[in-house]
Amino acid sequence: MAQQPEILILGIANTPAEYLDQLQAEVEGIHTALTKARQQNLCDPRELSQFTLEKMFAVFDDLNLSRRIAMLHYTGHSMASGLIVREGGRDKLLKADELRTFLQAQKNLKFVFLNSCYSEEIAEQLVEAGVPVVIGTDSGIQDVAARKIAVKFYELLGGGSKTVRQAFDLTQLYFEHHKDADDSPFRGFALGSDYPWHLFYQDEDAVEWRLVPESVVDQLERSDNLRKLLIVRESSDEAEYFSHALRVSLSGVANLMAYDIWQANEEGDPGKRAYAVEQAQSIAYLATPGLQGSLEGQLSWAKPLLSSAKPHFIIAGSGHVASTRQYLQHENMVAARDPQVVLSEFMTLEQLKKASDLDTIYRELFLKKLVELIGVGSDKEQLMSAFDALNFVEQKQAFDFDDQQKKVNFILIEGTPQCGHELLIRKILKYNGLYPGGQNKPVHLNVRKLVPSGFNEQYLWMLLNQGLLNTLSLNPDREEICRTIAQRLQQEDLVIILNEVEEVSLPELKNMILNLWKALNDYLPQSGLGNRLFMIFVHTGYRPDHCCVSEVALSAQNPACNAVPMPVISPLETEVFNTWYVDESQHFLPDSPFRRKIHQHRGEILQKKYIRKVVEEICILLDCPDVYDEVFKL
């Protein structure tokens, strides 16, 4: 598989009046500093002479380039209010807010380096706008020093396999030991601090990004406390895609390191190659046609090290499990009796190349089985997965729509939070390929905030008008709202969440929603629709006497409309809880708090009855309130 290198845009802005003669030397020095990364096809530096906003638009809007642009380095003049660029033969201020708006939309950027004077305020704005990491300065900087700092930083990032944070810290150490007494001319008026460059970020993970990955041996030496899974595969593109996607999906398991046999094969030292294989505590063989050829060829050095004594399993690929198993058994790399097999024949190369939803596919279909086989678990993400498995058997039967009907399926859910309606909604969304934070995220309307008192059907239409059409009106056009909903439902599912609806009787509330559904029927086409979901969740606040899901008994005249009766959420039965606990326990290590504490406190957990209270009690026992917050976040 041809690797696509990360692009570094080198933006240069010089002015005749205050000409900086080190700028081109800085750019050339960065090219040299990134030699190793360029040779490994990891980095593609591209120079943008006389840097302007228009030139940025041209390069970032190139579809072949934009998804690969990971770094932006600016060298030239600036001030707190923006960058000083040269356009049309005149100096021009590229305002900080313009730069912020533009870079905020570039979702693939890993970091920005503003190697110019007084760029600290710009850097802070960019980080607030979502750029992961920005380097800026708190004062004027010297021209020669600026060149040296930039070159050293990229030497460490691209030649030393350092993280952004490590490269920054080591560059500062280098500067303090090598700064000259007179590095002039200045890019500013004076060197205002001993080291004016600063690192700005919000997410700790962002500054741990590397341009050049660590070698697998380096990773293993830092991972003594992790369980290690080695993936053994052939060298084809399909097998590489599969291995990469599998490692990405397993990266969220906190106490596991998954790595690939070809990463070990890259080590030039035979001793290091052997070390990489011997460190594996579990081995996964990807059954594809070329596996045997690779193990007899380029990977023949690994065969004596791949012992059947270690835990192992086979991941099915392209229907070659039987022949792969027979070969591995003959070579004593897997057990003489049938080893465990994880099925995956449905995955195709085209699906792997898209990679848009692979993480979800792997987690849903493989993760639990792999966790069981590898012997890892007990992390918070696994607990999230366990809560997702809480059963809504009757409700699931209701939203198990017939794909052949191609209707708009209307669901009304209303009740108090203690029942865990949010979990049911997440399940329905997930079943329909939707996610709370995804592209088709629910439309949230906070009723108590927007309508403090006297909520009625007129206010409902006003809120829909605001939430769907983004306009305010005391007398909204109901037909326009229905047309908008109908148009959206022809393209995508639509979920509307009415939060904190507390000052209205439940029969009146239900009648409002049903009137909306009746009105919408007239605007939906009677054929040609996809199988769509139109769901309204009404969060009615904490009412101890009320806890249900509405059974909608509305017969729509439009044959393309289907009102779905949703059964009541009942208290959690002991048998259901026990079955859930037994099923989920196998995915956690034997000594995990999940197994020990939940078993020990089963009685008091079940006293909470309703799902939300049960989840809350479990999270308190396991000391993970953040998981509770995440479970009920829509």
Image: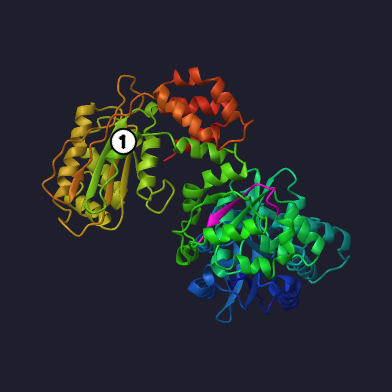
User: Residue 341, image x and y in percent?
Assistant: 53, 51
Which residue is tagged 1? Answer: 395
Q: What stretch is highlighted in magenta?
A: 307-317
Q: Does residue 430 appear left or right of residue 109 in this picture? A: left
> Does the magenta run of residues contain 30?
no
Foreground: 527 or 473? 527
Q: Which image quarter is the N terminus in?
A: bottom right
Q: In this view, does 277 lie to the left or right of 243?
A: right
* Residue at the image position 49 percent from the left and 66 percent from the top: 353
- The quarter holding residue 224 reads top right
Q: Is residue 434 placed above or below 48 in the rendered structure?
A: above
Q: In this view, does 304 lie above or below 634?
A: below
**Picture coordinates of residue 146, whole percent (x, y):** 76, 67
What is the basis of the colouring in this image?
Answer: rainbow
Residue 211 visible: no
Q: Which residue is drawn at 57% across and 60% down?
A: 324
